[in-house]
Amino acid sequence: MVSRAERGPVADWFWTIDRLFLAAFILLMGIGFMLSFAASPAVAERLNLDSFHFVKRHALFLAPAIATMVAISFLSPRQVRRTAAILLVVSLAMMVLALFFGVEVKGARRWISIGSLSIQPSEFMKPAFVVICAWLFSEHARQPDIPGNLFAILLFGIVAALLVAQPDLGQTVLITAVWGGMFFMAGMPWIWIILLGGLALGGFAFAYFLFDHVSGRIDRFLTGEGDTFQVDTAREAIIRGDWFGKGPGEGLVKRIIPDSHTDFIFSVAAEEFGIVFCMVIVAVFAFVVMRGLNHAFKERNDFTRFAVAGLVLLIGTQSMINVGVNLELLPAKGMTLPLISYGGSSMVAICVTAGFILALTRHRPEKRASERSLFRSGMLSPAE
């Protein structure tokens, strides 16, 4: 334990970090590692790999992911903006490269291979995009003459175009939902709400008629006809688990779910540990979102408020989509459960998101002292 009397970067970090946030993120990663023992051996065996191949790789990803989260949490808000700007430029460049030189998997070019590593640049783009859009919205709110909202719209258009080109419609929907929520917080005019809402509906219609896999998934979801093997087996695993599950290692349906270690790990958790355990997982995600929104509500700085809200919405919306697909409440979509599903790019990128949240929600005594000084001088009003 670090004493309050100690001084130094680590001691200051420990006593200023939101430890409940940190505990929630570590808990989710611990649950993910535990579930990898249940979900991944069957997949590895089907691929003629060592039974614990994915477990070992999951453990290998944990160390750099946690180190990334902790390192980023030391940053100041200004350093968060600069880091996000660099990360956004690099990830967008890599997304462009992936379209031409990336590895094609199931008709999509989303990954770039570097040696033995496969990197999905769009995963790292998401937290950086949220932070930069938060900065653009805040600059416009601070000084309306600055066209921050316009730049945010243009940036969103570039990101959405690259995601559709891959194609990755699920990530496009996720980014659109989070960006729309931030824009609404920033005081989006009603004319923009109507205009962008119409464009979103048009985009969904465009995707339905242009992409066969999109129309196929939506049709199967609405009619229940066609190849619904994954969602049917996922639902069967959840039903079989009942309230308290079959016990660790006792799941049977999980052995035939193709993506049990990634997209459908929630169903594996339900079969082996029960619905009550799944409710605990959902509660942890809900805690992260609600605590983040509470921080944003109390925050006076526009950039920090928009960024924290956007980042927790990113985690919350992604987890909601994953759980919704597992419960057959949403059309099938390959999207990981944050910090729990197997996947190096996803885990490290979500830890970047978590690191940004921890950095922006740290208690900063020097900031409060500065605000009190401004209040006394009359330069800052309580409403600001």
Image (spheres, rainbow, N blue to C red):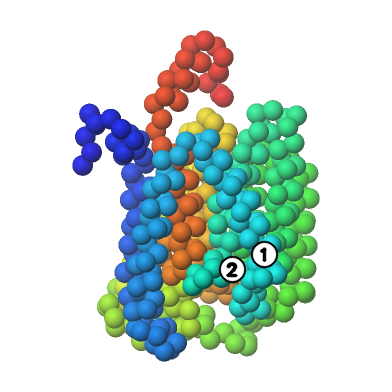
Crowding at mark 1 (Cα within 10 Å: few <14, some 14-19, many 20+): some
Which of 252 and 35 lies nearest the eye of the viewer? 35
Please name the residue shown 37% across and 78% down the image. Answer: 53
Where residue 158 appears, x then y in whole percent? 72, 55
Inter-mark Cα distance, 1 to 2? 8 Å
Examine the rendering and report whether any part of residue 269 can be seen.
Answer: no
Disc 1 element: helix
Amino acid identity at mark 2: Ile
Give the left or right position of residue 38, taking residue 161 as reference: left
> Residue 132's quadrant in the figure?
top right
Q: Which residue is mark 2?
A: 112
Q: Which mark is residue 1?
A: none
> How many marks on residues?
2
Please name the residue shown 48% across and 57% down the image. Answer: 350
Where residue 325 appears, x then y in whole percent? 53, 71
Would you say the residues marked 1 and 2 are in contact, meaning their CB atoms lie under 8 Å apart? yes
Please name the residue shown 31% across and 69% down the image. Answer: 34
Crowding at mark 2 (Cα within 10 Å: few <14, some 14-19, many 20+): many
Q: In this rendering, is residue 257 above or below 64?
A: below
Where residue 231 appears, x then y in whole percent? 52, 80
Disc 2 element: strand
Please name the residue shown 54% across and 44% down the image. Answer: 83
Give the left or right position of residue 138, taking residue 5 as reference: right
> Residue 186's quadrant in the figure?
top right
User: Which one is earlier in the sequence, the residue at label 1 or at label 2?
Assistant: 1
Q: Which mark is residue 97?
A: 1
Q: Quadrant of the N terminus?
A: top left
Amino acid identity at mark 1: Leu
